[in-house]
Image (cartoon, rainbow, N blue to C red):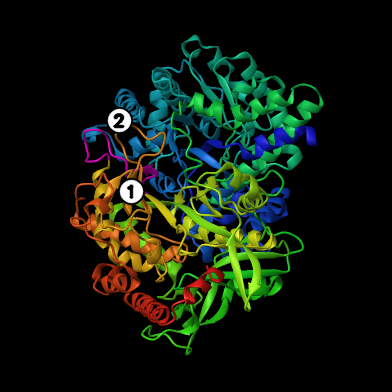
Amino acid sequence: MDQYAALKAAVETAELVDAHAHNIVALDSTFPFISCFSEATGDALSAVPHTINFKRSLKEISQLYGANSSLDVVQEYRSNCGLESVTSKCLAAAGISAVLIDNGLQLDKMLNIEWHKNFFPYVGRILRIEHVAERILGEGSPGGAPWTLDLFTKSFLDSLKSHADKVVGFKSIAAYRSGLEINTNVSEKDAEEGLNEVLRAGKPVRIANKNFIDHIFIRALEVAQSFDLPLQIHTGFGDKDLDLRLSNPLHLRSLLEDNRFSKSRIVLLHASYPFSKEASYLASVYSQVYLDFGLAVPKLSFHGMISSVKELLELAPIKKVMFSTDACGFPESYYLGAKKAREVIFSVLRDACINEDLSVAESIVAVKDIFSENARNLYKITTVSKSVENGIAPLSVKSGVNTSAQGVAFVRILWVDASGQHRCRVVPKKRFHDVVTKNGVGLTCASMAMSSHMDGPADGTNLTGVGEISLIPDLSTKRLIPWAKEQEMVLADMHLKPGTPWEYCPRDALRRVSKILKEEFNLVMNVGFENEFFLLRSVQVVDGKENWLPIDATPYCSAAAADAAFPILSEIMACLQSLNISVEQLHAESGNGQFEFAFVYTNCKNSADNIVFAREAIRAVARKHGLLATFVPKYSLADIGSGSHVHISLSENGQNVFMGRSGETRYGISKVGEEFMAGVLDHLPSILAFTAPVPNSYDRIQPNTWSGAYLCWGVENKEAPLRAASPPGTPDGSVSNFEIKAFDGCANPHLGLAAIMAAGIDGLRRKLALPEPIDCNPHDFKDKVARLPKSLAESVEALEKDTVLRDLIGEKLLVAIIGVRKAEVKYYSENKDAWKNLIYKY
């Protein structure tokens, strides 16, 4: 198999353009979840659990979720986690970078295309022509005049043309209504009689008359050809409304032979199964015919999928065969379609190499063509891939993403407290699945009142050892631990009781503020962390004390440092990849033994979750090598500090709206971006109580250390705490995001991001404007530029006065945080050397 390793890698890492899918529905839709596994409807659904596809697919979904292979358990998981969570998990595993949605299939409580843009980097629309015609007839004629064929045709064509620049293609379901033997010369008389028959049937309008359907089809194909839009046609199998005998694509030959349509582009959907050979033949002899294998993959048995795709490739040019999921209703159907497509394409192309039909190099090119390039070219998708920006990680051909594995005995339930410390409970796997997934594990209310120096409640938090909450695992975050493969880990939410979030829960605080940003402004905050840390080695114990020194003394971006630490860094990278955490780059930092990982941009919740897992991985691998990895802001007062810089942008419907257009905005930042950033700048002194949460944090935030010590902002000014950034690839004159430098590894990432977002919301509400940027070292003008808080006490004082953060984040949570921070101030002021112990805690 080693000789096909390159092919396997190409398949596993290929980004996918899903060229045909349908809308996802709300959790309370009447569209039954079991429809995810079959085209059956009505009474026939009762037999679905006895199909090969159901048994295989349910097992694969269960593995993805880390749940028992039970339909009831999976449905309960979906309900507990919420649609957004399971959608994010499924699509991250699928690795789909673009999707084309036919929203003409009307499902109960289906979510609109704009909703889908929150999860896919690119969403295009396919316009179903029969749906357009039915909508026109259902709404009535202009002015209420009786319908005539001419009047309908004009309205129909006007509607198609009005949508032509907003869609990537048309689609017909003629196969479902009257079959594929399209009469390209249907007479107006026959078409008008067909229209009248449809009208006589009353409402809701359902077009089934063959002559009228043929008329609609031909008119739509003319429009599609004039606008150079592809036309997708359902061919082959489907639900029982379809007459399979009439859905053989060979019925299209008279259409394909019509010279009027020789320049059209027609896509035969669903591998035309069971007529895959016929479809392959048509694609080989007609220049305008293209093929798609969604629905056949993943609905058939594995042998059936491989057989069907092999039949497509028997005659058809590889440049004409495309991937899609035909996903419908449920994010799980996207995941299954992507997962099985990778497995099937690898198997088919590997066999082609074994049989010497293709070389490995040719097969690798075929992978890219089938999975993305053919669709990009056909549908003219010019948008650059955003898979890296959005943190999409393709799944493995063998087993998908980090799923439950055999041999796992324990599950670690992780949370991060108000002091930013990672904590966990460990439970046996059986108990986890039998009890904990539903009821959680008990935890004292004092857990959110603990400081970095004491495992007990701090004064003034209003929390004590009385009372208990439930830690409810968020199953969408469950991961197999790469360095301890007999264990899994999962992040937990804090609930008063299952289903009722606790007001002190950091992850829920971020969700609540994110919901406000979305509901009030239709915005999503995206985040990318840059995390610095030191690798320390233990030296001889002196006077009973253990000393720790950096592993090297090399300069910034030193290749020697990379060489010296490569065994550790490469193992960390492998662990992060196993955890589905993508790294953009890593390098040696300025401090002795200091390194930085820059993590991929994704939505703020995922980014916060990922940084927790990443720190766990870095510390664990370092321990394995006899080293100590520490994220403490200032491990040595004589060396440079470590930050956890965070890059932030805003997206609306999947598009970055922080970036300004030349001539329309100030400083290359959009108006909404400026207002948001101005809010962050305005509240930055109180935000520091979240992002720089221990006194040691302020030993780092000093002038001339690129940590941002003054209350200002600048364009690409690394001495400013807020830096407007234009990374390579950003259009000239535009800013793609801003960086907050005053964020460190002691901060609870969910609370830190919640505070930043709350401040940005205030900026949007008040329509704040940024002051003039500082384009030099602000320390040179320290008499004119305000200093940020020099101590935690000062930032806590600012937070106590900040009613905006109090209202948005929550009174009770804020009181607890202030109490914990005051405890930190008191303890470290009274114990001058105690800060040195922070390396063991962060």
Q: Which residue is mark 1?
A: 723
**Between tags 2 and 1, which lies in front?**
1
Q: Position of residue 621 (x, y in %)?
A: 65, 59
Answer yes or no: is residue 42 visible.
no
Q: Position of residue 784 (x, y in %)?
A: 18, 55
Which of the two residues, 367 or 111, is positioned nearer the viewer here?
367
- Label annotation for residue 647: none
The magenta region covers: 649-668
Residue at 50%, 42% (x, y): give it.
22
- How far is disc 2 from disc 1 in space, using C-alphas? 62 Å
Q: Is residue 556 magenta?
A: no
Left or right of 829 in this view: 671: left
Q: Is residue 482 above or below residue 373?
A: below
Left or right of 618 in this view: 529: left
Q: Position of residue 575 (x, y in %)?
A: 64, 53
Q: Position of residue 707 (x, y in %)?
A: 37, 55
- Amino acid type, mark 1: Arg
Q: Count residues near mark 2 (Cα–Cα under 10 Å), then give few for <14, some for 14-19, many for 20+.
A: some
Left or right of 31 in this view: 812: left
Which of the two residues, 570 or 316, is positioned nearer the viewer here?
570
Where's the N terminus, which quadrant? top right
Left or right of 369 in this view: 790: left
Residue at 73%, 64% (x, y): give it.
486
Instruction: Tell me the element at label 2.
Output: loop
Q: Which residue is mark 2?
A: 147
Residue at 35%, 30% (x, y): give it.
163
Instruction: Return the disc, 2 or 1, that comes first in the chain's sequence.
Output: 2
Q: Is residue 168 above or below residue 780?
A: above
